[in-house]
Image: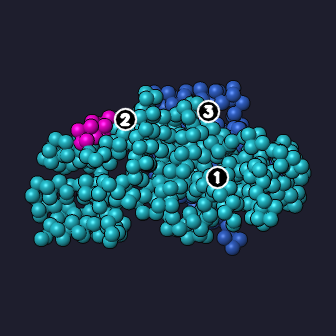
Chain colours: A cyan, B blue
């Protein structure tokens, strides 16, 4: 693809796919048609020049391809309704004059459909990355350490389920919105985290890009802003999280001059904007916590925020984070006492790591060694494993 | 679209229920059924006899094999169904969530394959 086509693909793929789904009512047909349109663009734009409105050109071309496909498959008899919808989209004759604003932005309906709870979480993630992000099946497979055929199969099944189970293409009505928005936010955060924890910057960037899109499409909701802020603040530490050998560096040992100031400033401004709405939620609180790590970390404030988060969204992981914050704010003993009371975190490496760290700080060396071993044995992440090995080696010295 | 709502629940719970509890549950079911009839969602529905009355039939090499019991031993058993008309899966989910047994058991929502006339060739 030429640079121009690639840029338009990146900016407009999701919007074009969403517009076509609205027109043809079928995910597979819409995706294929938009894919065709970009292939035609790649062949024609280098000689014909980039059209004044690339999105309108892509949607019009895709619409024509969809009509061709429907005709070719001799579906005329049964798909008259779809053809009628398609006819309502801008026609080819006026493609040069088409104003992009006449193409409705259906991306919000698309994201809610991709993240419908009737779809498995893995399917939600794959669909969101493919249909909205425009990632190829190969790219998604690589990101999730899956094979391309397995990923392609997962996408096909998900698209068929949307059609055959009657998953609606729409923004959910108000009474369903809080729950459904929760699913969308969780999926976007999972995409970001998968990239962030596996040190795959491109996937983390994609999570942020999708988060930005959601926040701009739902300007009245506070939690999408909170999620975007949280992702930006976490991502700002990307350069400081690994040392030259590729090993993990803990937050309080990171060189904070390596943190990305622009992301931090944007993240902080977003948290403040979100919290001013007066409807705090788990993502806003987590973002507020992330914003407390400046040149110094304000552990008293962090512990207080974790208190609120624990009341709002109780979970053993939040309780663990709160215990660590209490250890930093009120003393190691107090924090360790809270950690020891937690249940259900045995398979969670950060639990053993946090316990080990507190035991080490208290000089309880043997117990710390045992806890680091548990942490080491319970993680599958190579960088984490090396980190725990280093902790163990330091304790033996 | 039509959806079959399969009601799976633990039969032993019903066996352990008092007469009053059973009567309460049945009256909840009557109320629910009347409601979806009034809304035009109801197509059909029935309660099934317990799995102790089930018979499984297989034909292998032309021979009919009849055995006592359900197709699979599971923690929750199929105890009844509703066939409903709903505009999409969200409406089907909303209806399924109001089935009294959804609180203790599981409702499986299965779209029906469209009749040949509606299927694009």
- Secondary structure category for the residue under label 3: loop
Tell whether A105 sits left or right of A367: right
Residue shown at 60% from the left, 44% from the top: A112
Do discs 1 and 3 share a chain?
yes
In the image, is residue A122 above or below residue B12?
below
Q: Chain of mark 1?
A: A
- The magenta segment is A298-308
Tell whether A339 sits left or right of A69: left
User: How far apart, in angstroms, are the residues tagged by discs 2 and 1?
Assistant: 36 Å
Q: Few, some or many C-alpha atoms within 10 Å of disc 3 (few <14, some 14-19, many ≥20)?
A: few
Residue A139 placement (x, y as % from top left): 57, 65
Tell whether A55 sits left or right of A90: left
Residue closest to the eye, A342 or A292? A292
Task: Identify the residue under disc 2.
Answer: A312
- Whether the magenta-drawn stretch holds residue A86 is answered as no
Residue A255 placement (x, y as % from top left): 29, 57
Camera-near label (1 vs 3) is 1
User: Going from the N terminus, do you reach mark 2 or mark 1 first?
Assistant: 1
Residue shown at 54% from the left, 31% from the top: A220
Task: Identify the residue under disc 1.
Answer: A11
Residue closest to the eye, A58 or A178? A58
Quadrant holding the C terminus of chain A: bottom left
- Whether the magenta-drawn stretch holds residue A302 is answered as yes
Task: Identify the residue under disc 3.
Answer: A173
Residue shown at 21% from the left, 48% from the top: A339
Asked which quadrant contains residue B17, the reply is top left
Residue B18 placement (x, y as % from top left): 43, 32
In the image, farthest residue toward the bottom: B61
Q: Are marks 2 and 1 in contact (CB under 8 Å)?
A: no
User: How far apart, in angstroms, are the residues tagged by discs 2 and 3?
Assistant: 24 Å
Residue closest to the eye, B21 or A113? A113
């Amino acid at each position: 693809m030429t640079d121009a086509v690639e840029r338009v693909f990146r900016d407009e793929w999701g919007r074009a796919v969403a517009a076509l789904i609205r027109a043809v009512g079928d995910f597979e047909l819409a995706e294929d048609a938009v894919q065709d349109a970009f292939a035609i663009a790649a062949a024609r734009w280098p000689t014909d020049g980039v059209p004044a409105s690339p999105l309108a050109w892509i949607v019009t071309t895709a619409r024509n391809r969809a009509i061709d496909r429907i005709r070719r498959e001799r579906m005329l008899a049964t798909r008259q309704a779809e053809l009628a919808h398609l006819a309502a989209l801008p026609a080819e004759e006026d493609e040069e004059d088409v104003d992009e604003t006449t193409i409705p932005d259906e991306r919000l309906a698309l994201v809610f459909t991709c993240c419908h709870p009737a779809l498995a979480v893995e399917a939600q993630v794959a669909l969101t990355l493919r249909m909205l992000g425009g990632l190829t099946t190969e790219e998604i497979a690589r990101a999730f350490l899956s094979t391309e055929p397995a990923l392609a199969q997962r996408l096909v099944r998900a698209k068929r389920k949307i059609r055959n189970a009657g998953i609606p293409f729409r923004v959910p009505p108000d009474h369903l919105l809080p729950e459904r928005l929760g699913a969308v936010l969780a999926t976007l955060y999972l995409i970001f985290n998968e990239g962030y924890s596996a040190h795959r910057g491109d996937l983390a960037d994609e999570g942020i890009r999708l988060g930005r899109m959601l926040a701009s499409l739902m300007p009245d909701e506070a939690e999408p802003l909170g999620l975007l802020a949280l992702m930006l603040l976490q991502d700002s530490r990307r350069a400081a999280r690994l040392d030259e050998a590729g090993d993990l560096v803990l937050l309080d040992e990171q060189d904070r001059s390596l943190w990305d100031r622009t992301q931090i400033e944007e993240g902080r401004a977003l948290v403040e904007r979100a919290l001013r709405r007066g409807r705090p939620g788990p993502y806003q609180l987590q973002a507020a916590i992330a914003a407390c790590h400046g040149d110094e970390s304000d552990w008293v404030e962090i512990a207080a925020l974790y208190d609120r988060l624990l009341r709002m969204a109780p979970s053993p992981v939040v309780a663990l984070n709160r215990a660590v914050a209490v250890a930093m704010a009120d003393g190691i003993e107090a924090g360790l006492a809270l950690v020891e009371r937690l249940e259900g975190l045995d398979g969670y490496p950060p639990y053993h790591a946090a316990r080990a760290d507190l035991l080490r700080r208290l000089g309880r060396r043997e117990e710390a060694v045992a806890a680091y071993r548990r942490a080491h044995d319970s993680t599958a992440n190579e960088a984490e494993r090396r980190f725990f090995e280093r902790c163990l080696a330091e304790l033996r010295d | 679209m039509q959806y079959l709502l399969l009601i799976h629940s633990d039969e032993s719970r019903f066996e352990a229920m008092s007469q009053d509890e059973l009567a309460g549950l049945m009256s909840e079911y009557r109320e629910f059924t009347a409601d979806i009839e009034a809304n035009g969602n109801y197509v059909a529905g029935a309660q099934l006899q317990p799995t102790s009355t089930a018979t499984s039939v297989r034909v292998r090499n032309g021979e009919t094999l009849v055995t006592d019991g359900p197709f699979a031993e599971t923690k929750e058993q199929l105890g009844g169904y509703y066939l409903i008309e709903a505009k999409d899966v969200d409406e089907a989910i909303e209806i399924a969530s109001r089935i009294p047994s959804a609180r203790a058991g599981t409702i499986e929502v299965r779209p029906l394959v469209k009749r040949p006339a509606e299927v694009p060739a």
